Image (cartoon, grey):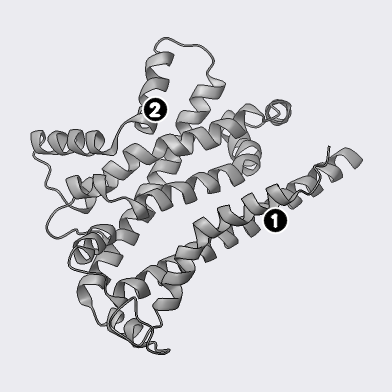
Amino acid sequence: MSRKFTWFNATALTLGFAFLYIPMIVLVVYSFNESKLVTVWAGFSTKWYGELFRNQAFLDAAWVTLKVAVMSSTLATVLGTMAAYVLVRAGRFHGRTLFSGMIYAPLVMPEVITGLSLLLLFISLNIPRGVFTIVLAHTTFSMCYVSVVVSSRLASFDRSLEEAALDLGCTPFDAFRSVTLPVIAPAVISGWLLAFTLSLDDLVIASFTSGPSSTTLPIKIFSAVRLGVSPEINALSTIMIAIVTVGVITASLMSKRALVKRQRDEQRAFQQ
């Protein structure tokens, strides 16, 4: 059923988008400000982008953040997909409740508790804090999000396709690789992007598990903001917004192309 257009719906939608995106637009505009004062417009300039790329501390923090985000999101996607497959396909088994509780616990656990518990774990195991510990920490709390996204797609998956592949001689692994994985690929990609965004944005857990030589970008920005917002931070935030926007658009196009290709293949299979 189609809903009628009302001024209340239009106003609520406009105010909602304005609340979300006007601060970002203002930040992007003031990143091209000539003045060093972020609240005073003094003309158009791109000099703060040049200053940003000459700031080695920000560049090092950005490299650490990207490295951690890529590694943790990839590892979280693999583990989260495996956990989702077990929860959906394994049925009832001994310890299922405990297993699902451990998977979904980080969803409701405060980040301070998660970061502190991981810090105590790394100290008790004599693991030096650095990039490795941040990757483990980010994987721990982001794999549950991947598991939720992938399990919702697996729950609606038509298992007759796998059964047909098994009847044609495929092994269970080949059936998963050739049939199941291409179908759930949009959900897997969405889970990876969600894990990447969570890792890129994390401050609390990274502050507990990072070391002196592994400062992430959110920690660096938070430390710099306490002394006052500089135009370099506006420029850096604008670049991050652009990267995230391009990534979301690219992932959406890839998911749409995969869906169209899958529908076309299904139509060809039915025609044959």
Which of the two residues, 173 or 73, is positioned nearer the viewer here? Answer: 73
Secondary structure of the residue carrying numbered label 1: helix
Secondary structure of the residue carrying numbered label 2: helix
- Judge from the rendering whether residue 141 lies leftward or rightward of residue 172; answer left or right: left
Which of the two residues, 234 or 265, is positioned nearer the viewer here? Answer: 234
Residue 171: % across, % down: 60, 30
Instruction: Give the quarter of the image for residue 151.
Output: top right
Residue at image point 69% right, 48% down: 8
Residue denoted by label 2: 103
Can the viewer see residue 272?
Answer: no
Q: Residues within 10 Å of mark 2 (few under 14, many from 20)?
A: many
Residue 53: % across, % down: 30, 80
Instruction: Give the quarter of the image for residue 62.
Output: bottom left
Please tell me how many numbered marks the rendered image carries. 2
Residue at image point 50% right, 56% down: 20
Contact check, label 1 and label 2, Cβ < 8 Å: no
**Position above or below: 39 against 86:** below
**Position above or below: 228 against 136:** below
Residue denoted by label 1: 257
Q: Considering the image in quadrants, where does the C terminus appear? A: top right
